[in-house]
Image: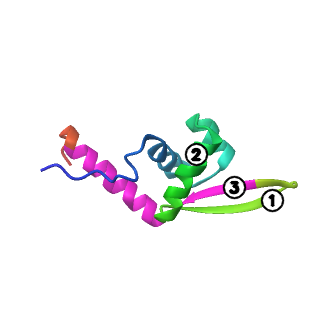
């Protein structure tokens, strides 16, 4: 009856990151940190977890001599998010 919830996306901060990237496709680390109100250290750990399962791509580069980290959602990440939402809908009794 109830579908299992994806443990990677069930974390509040990881879900926030994926939700944000769904709407903007890619974003700088600082933008994500500001929008999620997370600490840099915690956000870095959660971004690495999302990267490890290939839900996001992370590009590190320099812009005006400052390090810049850009996160971009992958097709696998989009699919995982869509499946997570469908699973949540079964818990909420939402009809398709």
Q: Is residue 39 visible?
A: yes
Residue 62 is tagged as 1
Q: Earlier in the sequence, mark 3 or mark 1?
A: 1
Look at the magenta stretch and give its main secondary structure.
Answer: helix
Q: Label 2 crowding class (10 Å Cα cut-off): few <14, some 14-19, many 20+?
A: many
Which residue is nearer to you in this view: 10 or 1? 10
C-alpha separation, residue under disc 3 versus residue under disc 1: 8 Å
Which is more N-terminal, label 3 or label 2?
2
13 relative position to 90: left or right: right
**Residue at x 43% of width, y 40% of height:** 12
Say few, some or many: other residues with alpha carbon within 10 Å of mark 1 (under 14 / 14 to 19 / 20 or more): few
Q: Position of residue 61 (x, y in %)?
A: 76, 62
Position of 68 with respect to 24 (left or right) is right
Q: Quadrant of residue 26?
A: bottom right
Residue drawn at the location 50% of the way across and 57% of the way down: 49
In the image, residue 57 above or below residue 64: below
Q: Position of residue 92 (x, y in %)?
A: 22, 38
Mark 2 vs mark 3: give the one in front.
Answer: 2
Q: Count how many numbered circles sit on residues in the image.
A: 3
On screen, residue 89 versus residue 19, left or right, reads left
Q: Nearer the viewer, mark 1 or mark 2?
A: 2
Which residue shows up at 41% across the image and 44% down it? 11
Label 1 element class: strand
Q: Is residue 39 magenta?
A: no
Disc 3 designates what residue? 69
- Residue 22: x and y in percent read 49, 51
Q: Which residues are magenta?
A: 68-90
Instruction: Report how far apart the C-alphas of labels 1 and 2 lie in the structure.
Output: 19 Å
Q: Secondary structure at mark 3?
A: strand
> From mark 2 to mark 3, how far is it between C-alphas?
12 Å
In the displayed orientation, state which residue is furthest to the right. 65
Q: Residue tagged by mark 2?
A: 43
């Amino acid at each position: 009856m109830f579908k299992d919830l994806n443990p990677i996306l069930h974390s509040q901060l990881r879900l926030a990151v994926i939700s944000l990237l769904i709407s903007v496709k890619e974003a700088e680390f600082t933008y994500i940190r500001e929008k999620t109100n997370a600490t840099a250290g915690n956000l870095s750990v959660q971004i690495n977890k999302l990267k490890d399962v290939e839900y996001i791509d992370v590009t590190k580069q320099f812009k005006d001599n400052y390090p810049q980290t850009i996160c971009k959602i992958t097709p696998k990440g989009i699919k995982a998010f869509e499946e997570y939402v469908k699973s949540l809908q079964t818990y909420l009794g939402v009809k398709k």
